Image: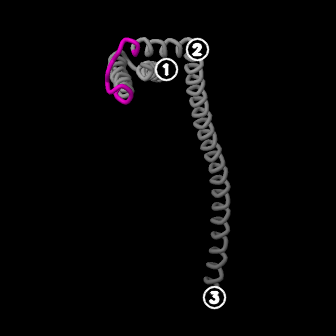
Amino acid sequence: MIGTVQSQLIGLAVTVLTGVITGVSFDLYRVARWAFRPGRAVTAICDVVFWLFAATVVFAFLLAYSWGEVRFYMFVGFAMGFGIYRMVLGRHVVGGAVSTYKYAQHTRRKMVVGYKEGALGLRRASTGWRKRLRKVSLYMQALWGRVKRELYFWRKGS
């Protein structure tokens, strides 16, 4: 008798844990859906895929613990885990995921802006170098022209 009560309590704990894991994955999916803002059709498809994934996770836990037997207390444990997670940790997980997403977006924006500013700085620097090089080139061309005239004068006179 004690072995069955103990195994049922362990089963209840496993289903509560499964409920918490499903709650976390559901909230992360909600944040991803908020971040990417897909259309209605894509949202419907992703909802079906998510719930198939969640059902697979629940089935894997049930299969690993109770060889796939489903009892009423398991449904209660799953609902308890999901509800407790939503009341206690739900806001914190969603807030952390949203903050992480916003920080990643901010960092990406800063990197893109930094890249653009760096490229603009290089372009400005290259424009300055190109102008200086053009001046030096014109000066060298004028100098070479003078040298050629002088050399031509010497050749002609000899």
Residue range in magenta is 63-74
Which residue carries the number 2 mark? 88
Tell me the mark number nearer the camera, choosing from 1 and 3.
1
Q: Residue furthest bottom?
A: 158
Left or right: residue 32 versus residue 101 is left
Residue type (three-letter) at the residue carrying disc 1? Val
- Image quadrant where one finds the N terminus: top left
* Residue depicted at 63% across the width and 65% down the height: 141
On screen, 64 above or below 76? Answer: below
Which residue carries the number 3 mark? 158
Whole-angstrom CA distance, mark 3 to mark 2, is 104 Å
Badge 2 density bin: few <14, some 14–19, many ≥20, Cα 10 Å: few
Residue 113 position in % (x across, y down):
61, 35
- Residue 26 is covered by the magenta coloring: no
Front position in the image: 23 or 118: 23
* Residue depicted at 60% across the width and 41% down the height: 115
Residue type (three-letter) at the residue carrying disc 2? Val
On screen, 151 above or below 35? Answer: below
Which residue carries the number 1 mark? 20
Residue 45 position in % (x across, y down):
32, 20
